[in-house]
Image (cartoon, grey):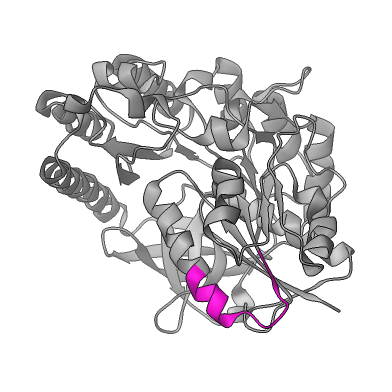
Amino acid sequence: MPSVYIETYGCQMNVSDSELMYGKLQAEGYETSDSPVGADVVLVNTCAIRENAEQRVIGRLGELRRDLKPGAVLGVTGCMAQRLGPRLLETDTRVQLVVGPDAYRMLPALIDGARNGERFTATDFDLEEHYEDFTARRFEGVKAWIPVQRGCDYRCTYCIVPTTRGPERSRRLAEVVRETHEVVAQGITEVVLLGQTVNSYHDGRHDFADLLRAVGGVDGIRRVRYTSPHPNDFSDRVIAAMAETASVCEHVHLPMQSGSTSMLKRMLRRYTREEYLACVERLRAAIPGLGLTTDIIVGFPGETDEEFEDTLSLCREVRFDDAFTFKFSAREGTPATRMPPEWTVPDATVDRRYDALVATVRGIAREKNMARLGARVEVLVEKEARKGELLQARSRDFKTVLVPGTPELIGSYLRVELTGTTGATFTGATVQERSALPMAG
């Protein structure tokens, strides 16, 4: 049997797409390989959200070329493939396939052609493609990524996603529920619903509130998560569904990007500072103990000291549990690249602001985590930790907890007492043996 190795970069949607590609190729007679060395097909599934992500892939392609066995097929898939298209074939003669996110159905045929010396680009959008007939080969036995929506219609001025993923379209609710039942049959109890603006989901009849209730009601599902939502799409119905569906976890990753209304307007985020804060207040009022994380960009064109201070002050007011922080990266084809050159923020200023933001976010997170010590929470053991004889687990509100134990506990639910924190993660001691029965959070 020919073998395939897929190396994945970027977001959870890319992880899910790699699982779909593996599943499709397995169905066509391929076996999976744990290493590019010796594999018959090597695919690099890419991200294009920031320039450094693309540069990493370009460097990695150079490394892979040295490892490929004679006759092996090298392909680039995902968002970077969609963005650059034929240019990738022109700049790297060893790459034989460039395949965008809507063309994975063609992979077996494209690989066959590549073996005969042909080179292909497949980057057309297919607004009907949801890969419903694919059976994903899931990487984890603990949680399942389930795409419910592809593409995005918001068109924020810094974002390349509408170019690489196309316009928004949603899967039918019945198909998502069917896949959830399949996941349960595989012994998986947690699902993560994926979409670029997942809470704007609508299949023509059902909205995201309906989807949360339907998936959360599947027998055998103990945890439902989703990412990433948009602040504008938290309707009262969606918030009520979160609060009333027991399996929906008490965590929201709510991208903020900036705490300044004027900056948010330049980003075309379509909400103000006050509206973002109102969304936070509605969520916290409905869902006690809600964990809240976010995304924040530093150094967007035109950012002033006052606008950056607005970001810091909103972080202090909201008190996020954690934040993914980014330095602005201009992406070819986005409106941000057409902003006046004099709006460019000097690198030294970006670096200084970034350090101040990270210090603020981490300080708040550490303070909040210290206050949690002694609490008892339910955790799901996900995998072995990197250091020591520990396992990495996750609470319902998305806290990472390291607990002692052996690998056979992976996939189990434990009740633990939080005994220590590094500021970012917790250590915990088991106070109740693993259980297959639902437990309060």
Determine if the magenta segment contains residue 68: yes
- Name which quarter of the figure residue 25 lies in: bottom right
At x 40% / y 38%, what residue is drawn?
Answer: 331
Along the line of sight, the residue nearer the viewer: 336 or 430: 336
> Residue 383, position in %: x, y?
55, 71
* Left or right position of 212 against 336: right
Residue 20 appears in which quarter of the rendering?
bottom right
- Left-right relation of 194 to 204: left
Residue at image point 37% right, 39% down? 295
Instruction: State the residue in front, 193 or 348.
Output: 348
Q: Which residues are magenta?
A: 62-74
As for residue 47 lying within the magenta part, the answer is: no
Counting the numbered discs, the total is 0
Going by the image, does 15 lie left or right of 391?
right
Where the N terminus falls, by quadrant?
A: bottom right
Quadrant assignment, res 246: top right
Q: Residue at x 81, y 50 (%)?
A: 106
- Does 383 sit above or below residue 217? below
Residue 10 in view = yes
Could one spot residue 392 in this view of the protein?
A: no
Q: Position of residue 155 (x, y in %)?
A: 49, 23
Residue 26 in the image, given as x and y percentages of width and height? 83, 66
Q: Determine whether 40 is above or below 187 in the image.
A: below
Q: Position of residue 441 (x, y in %)?
A: 52, 49
**Residue 227 placement, left or right of 270:** right
User: Quick one: 289 or 381, which is closer to the camera?
Assistant: 381
